[in-house]
Amino acid sequence: MNEKQLKSKFDFGPLATAMRNARKSEGWTQDKAAEKLGVQQKYYQRIETSGTDHHPSLDLFYKAVRLFHISVDEYFLSSRKPTASSNRRRLDALLDTMDEHELSCMESNARALLRLRETRKSKE
C-alpha cells in the first residue's frame, strides 16, 4: 500500500479538531502553536482547518500529539475504549505541574462539581 492509499484511509479531521480544541484550551494562537511545533503558521492552519485534506508528516503528528496531550487511541483504535481521553490527558499534564496546595484546591473544586451534578440529578 503506497502513502497516498494510506492517507486516503484515515480521516485526520477528528484529530485536527482535537488539535484545535487543545490549542484553544492552552490559550494559544495558531501562530504560537506553529512556533512550538517548528512549522510555518500557514502550514499549521491548513492542517488544523482542513484535516481531511492535509495530513501532517509523521514527525509533526508525533510532536503535535505530545504537545497537546492528545490520546490517539480514541482515533486509531475506535473499537477499543481509550485508556484516557485527550481532555483527561491535558488535565493530567496540568495537574502534574501543581504543588500540593494547588492540588488540594483542584480536589475541592472537583468534589464541588460532583455535588452540583448530584443536586441537578435529584431535581430532574
Image (tube, rainbow, N blue to C red):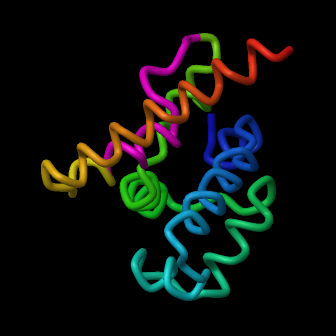
Q: Is residue 7 above or below residue 47?
A: above
Q: Nearer the viewer, residue 43 or 106?
A: 106
Query: Percent position (x, y) of residue 12?
Result: 70, 48
At x 45%, y 52%, the residue is: 65
At x 80%, y 64%, the residue is: 50
Q: Is residue 26 above or below residue 98?
A: below
Q: Is 92 included in the stretch rendered in magenta?
A: yes
Residue furthest out toward the right:
124
At x 46%, y 60%, the residue is: 64
In the displayed structure image, the side of residue 3 where residue 72 appears, left or right: left
Q: Residue 2, located in which quarter of the rendered image?
A: top right
Q: Is 86 included in the stretch rendered in magenta?
A: yes
Quadrant of the snapshot with the N terminus: top right
Query: Percent position (x, y) of residue 46?
Result: 73, 74
Q: Nearer the viewer, residue 62 or 88?
A: 88
Query: Percent position (x, y) of residue 54?
Result: 72, 63
Tell me where the magenta segment starts and ends, as one range: 80-93
Residue furthest out toward the left:
100
In the displayed structure image, the side of residue 50 where residue 59 appears, left or right: left
Q: How many marks?
A: 0
At x 33%, y 37%, the residue is: 107
Query: Percent position (x, y) of residue 84?
Result: 44, 28
Q: Nearer the viewer, residue 46 or 92?
A: 92
